[in-house]
Image: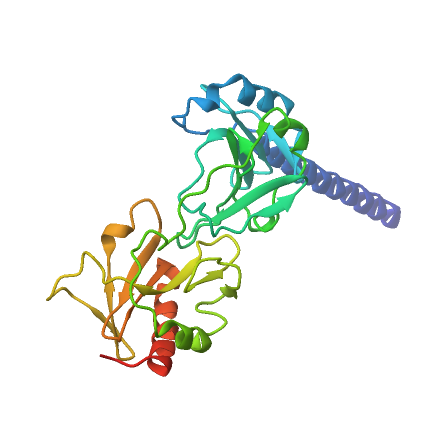
C-alpha cells in the first residue's frame, strides 16, 4: 500500500509540474505576443506628401507581414503615410511615405535593386545604434523603411511591390556629388597620385572605378557615405594663415567645417604639396582615410 501510495503521489506531482511548465510557456508566449502587438509610437514628420492620396493608398495596400514581422497599429494620433511591423517593443520595422531623401543621396551613391525597386541604404553611425533606413530612389513621393534589428539591416525590403505601385515611378534627383562643386586647380601630380592610391582608405571601403569625374576617386561601403578624393583643386577659399592644421605623416591638413552642412562627412584639404587635394569622408572613417591618403601623397608627390 505504501509503495502504491508513493507512486500515485509521484505521478500526481509530476503531472502538476508538467502542467505548470506548459502554463509558464504559454503564459510567456501570450505576454510576448501581447507586447509585440502593442501599438508603435511614431512622431509626426512635416511633409505635405505624407498626407497625399498616393501615400494613403500605399498604407492601405501594405502587407500584414514584412520580412517576417507582423503588422501592428500606430499610437494615436498616428502620423499620415506611416505604418509599422513588430516582433517586440525593441525589434520593429517602420515605414513612412512622403519623406525627403537624405543629403547622403548623391550622384556617387550606390543603390540596391530588390523586388523591382531601387533603394539607398543609410546606416546610423551613432555608436550603439542599430538603426538602418532604406530609401526608395525611383518613386515619387519617396518611401523610407527603417529597421531596428541587426537581423533585418543587410537586405533591402521586399514584399512592398503592390503597395509602392500606387506611387509614380520616377528617378529622384540626387544631390551634387561631394567635392564636385570645388574649383579646379593645377593637376600635374594627379596621375602619379592615382598610381599610389590604396585599394581601401578605411575598413569596409573599396575603391570604385566609375566616378566619372576627372581626378576623382570614390571609395564605397554598404550603407555608409562615400569617401571621395579629388586631386587638382583650387586652394581652399576659407583657409587663412594661422588657422589650426592637422599634421598627418608629414602632410598638413586643413578641415573646412563650413562645407559640412547637411551631411555627416567632413572636408579636408592637403596643404604643403606642389598642388592641392581635397578629401570628403564620414567622421568615423576620416582618421584612417587621412593616414592612408597622407602616405600616398608622400610616396607620389613632392612637397613645396
245 on left or right of 202? left
> What is the quadrant of residue 47 in the picture?
top left
User: In this picture, is 22 found above or below 249?
Assistant: above
Judged left or right of residue 121, residue 258 is: left
**Which residue: 23% across, 63% down?**
235
Image quadrant where one finds the C terminus: bottom left
Q: Residue at x 38, y 77 (%)?
A: 296
Q: Where residue 130 sits in the image (x, y, percent)?
A: 48, 49
- Residue 77 occupies quadrant: top left
As drawn, 178 above or below 205? above
Q: Nearer the viewer, residue 281 or 232?
A: 232
Residue 99: image x %, image y %? 46, 31
Residue 61: image x %, image y %?
A: 64, 23
- In the image, residue 41 lies at what x, y percent? 46, 29
- Can residue 78 be seen here? The reply is no
Relative depth, front residue between 209 and 133:
209
- Pick whichever, 96 or 217, lies toward us: 217
Q: Residue furthest left?
A: 242
In the image: residue 251, left or right of residue 190:
left
| Residue depicted at x 41% and y 60% | 228
Q: How many marks?
A: 0
Whether residue 45 is visible, yes or no, is: yes
70 w.r.t. 105: above or below: above
Q: Nearer the viewer, residue 58 or 241?
A: 241
Amino acid at each position: 500500500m505504501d509503495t502504491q501510495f508513493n507512486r500515485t503521489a509521484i505521478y500526481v506531482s509530476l503531472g502538476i509540474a508538467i502542467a505548470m511548465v506548459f502554463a509558464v510557456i504559454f503564459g510567456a508566449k501570450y505576454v510576448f505576443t501581447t507586447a509585440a502587438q502593442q501599438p508603435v509610437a511614431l512622431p509626426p514628420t512635416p511633409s505635405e506628401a505624407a498626407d497625399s492620396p498616393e501615400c494613403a493608398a500605399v498604407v492601405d495596400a501594405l502587407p500584414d507581414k514584412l520580412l517576417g514581422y507582423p503588422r501592428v497599429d500606430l499610437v494615436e494620433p498616428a502620423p499620415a503615410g506611416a505604418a509599422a511591423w513588430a516582433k517586440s517593443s525593441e525589434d520593429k520595422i517602420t515605414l513612412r511615405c512622403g519623406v525627403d531623401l537624405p543629403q547622403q543621396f548623391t550622384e556617387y551613391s550606390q543603390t540596391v535593386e530588390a523586388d523591382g525597386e531601387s533603394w539607398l541604404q543609410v546606416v546610423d553611425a551613432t555608436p550603439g545604434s542599430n538603426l538602418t533606413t532604406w530609401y526608395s530612389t525611383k518613386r515619387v513621393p519617396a518611401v523610407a523603411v527603417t529597421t531596428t534589428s541587426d537581423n533585418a539591416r543587410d537586405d533591402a525590403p521586399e514584399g512592398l511591390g503592390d503597395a509602392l505601385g500606387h506611387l509614380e515611378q520616377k528617378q529622384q534627383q540626387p544631390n551634387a556629388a561631394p567635392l564636385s562643386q570645388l574649383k579646379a586647380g593645377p593637376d600635374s601630380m594627379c596621375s602619379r597620385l592615382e598610381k599610389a592610391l590604396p585599394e581601401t582608405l578605411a575598413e569596409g571601403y573599396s575603391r570604385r572605378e566609375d566616378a566619372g569625374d576627372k581626378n576623382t576617386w570614390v571609395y564605397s561601403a554598404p550603407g555608409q557615405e562615400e569617401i571621395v578624393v579629388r586631386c587638382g583643386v583650387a586652394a581652399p577659399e576659407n583657409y587663412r594663415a594661422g588657422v589650426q592644421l592637422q599634421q598627418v605623416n608629414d602632410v598638413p591638413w586643413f578641415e573646412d567645417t563650413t562645407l559640412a552642412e547637411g551631411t555627416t562627412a567632413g572636408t579636408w584639404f592637403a596643404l604643403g604639396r606642389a598642388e592641392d587635394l581635397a578629401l570628403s569622408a564620414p567622421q568615423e572613417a576620416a582618421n584612417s582615410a587621412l593616414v592612408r591618403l597622407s602616405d600616398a601623397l608622400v610616396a607620389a608627390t613632392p612637397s613645396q
